[in-house]
Image: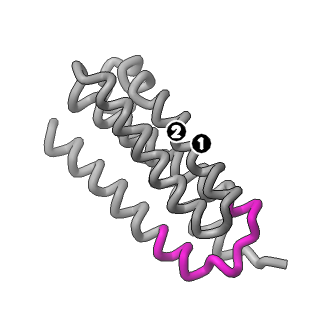
């Protein structure tokens, strides 16, 4: 189970990296409303996926997993929000923080269910795919 969890974590971060590069190239075409949603989806989605998977891997280290998930969400939300402006950076930061604080609790409440972990990964994947779709049709006015 351990290799499976780590491969999902690596996949999440690779997906976030590819999405960040795509969005960075298109940043001039994206208005701040969409930018705020992007920052919230990226920070919150990655914090949620990371928190759930890490609590599955390290169930007795609840506090440490919570800190790592919150820091991951804050960092990713800030990076994605920083593409646009400071207000968007702050939105991504706080969204990642709050989701990172809740994610290990959600994972523990799911009783370490593999189907739930797969559903969470599909959620993260679909969220990032929606970011691609939303920015392809975006035109800043």
Q: Callout 1 environment at 10 Å: few (<14), some (14 to 19), or many (20+)?
A: many
Farthest residue, direction front: 86
Residue position marked by numbered label 2 in the rendering: 97
Residue 117 falls in image quadrant: top left
Range of magenta residues: 20-35
Label 2: which secondary element: helix
Residue 53 in which image quadrant: top left
- Left or right: 42 with respect to 105? right
Q: Quadrant of the C terminus?
A: bottom right
In space, the residues marked 1 and 2 are separated at their CA atoms by: 5 Å
* Residue 94 can be seen in this image: yes
Tell me what residue is drawn at x 33 percent, y 18 percent: 111
| 141 is higher (above) or lower (below) than 88 | below
In the displayed structure, 134 sits above or below 61; it is below
Q: Main secondary structure of the magenta part?
A: helix
Q: Name the residue under label 1.
A: 94
Q: Residue at 52%, 43% (x, y): give it.
A: 96
Residue 28 position within the rendered picture, expressed as x and y whole percent measured from the top left: 68, 81
Q: Assess whether residue 32 is covered by the magenta stretch.
A: yes
Which image quarter holds the N terminus? top left
Q: How crowded is mark 2: few (under 14 residues within 10 Å), some or many (20 or more)?
A: many
Query: Marks 2 and 1: in contact by CB < 8 Å?
Result: yes
Residue 117 visible somewhere in the drawing: no
In this picture, residue 98 sits left or right of residue 29: left
């Amino acid at each position: 189970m351990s290799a499976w969890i780590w491969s999902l974590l690596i996949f999440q971060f690779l997906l976030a990296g590819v999405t960040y590069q795509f969005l960075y190239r298109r940043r001039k075409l994206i208005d701040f409303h969409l930018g705020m949603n992007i920052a919230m989806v990226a920070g919150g989605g990655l914090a949620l996926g990371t928190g759930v998977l890490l609590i599955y891997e390290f169930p007795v280290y609840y506090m440490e997993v919570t800190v790592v998930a919150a820091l991951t969400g804050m960092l990713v939300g800030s990076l994605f929000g920083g593409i646009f402006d400071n207000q968007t950076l702050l939105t991504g930061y706080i969204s990642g923080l709050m989701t990172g604080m809740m994610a290990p609790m959600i994972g523990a409440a799911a009783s370490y269910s593999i189907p739930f972990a797969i559903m969470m990964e599909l959620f993260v994947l679909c969220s990032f795919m929606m970011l691609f779709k939303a920015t392809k049709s975006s035109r800043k006015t």
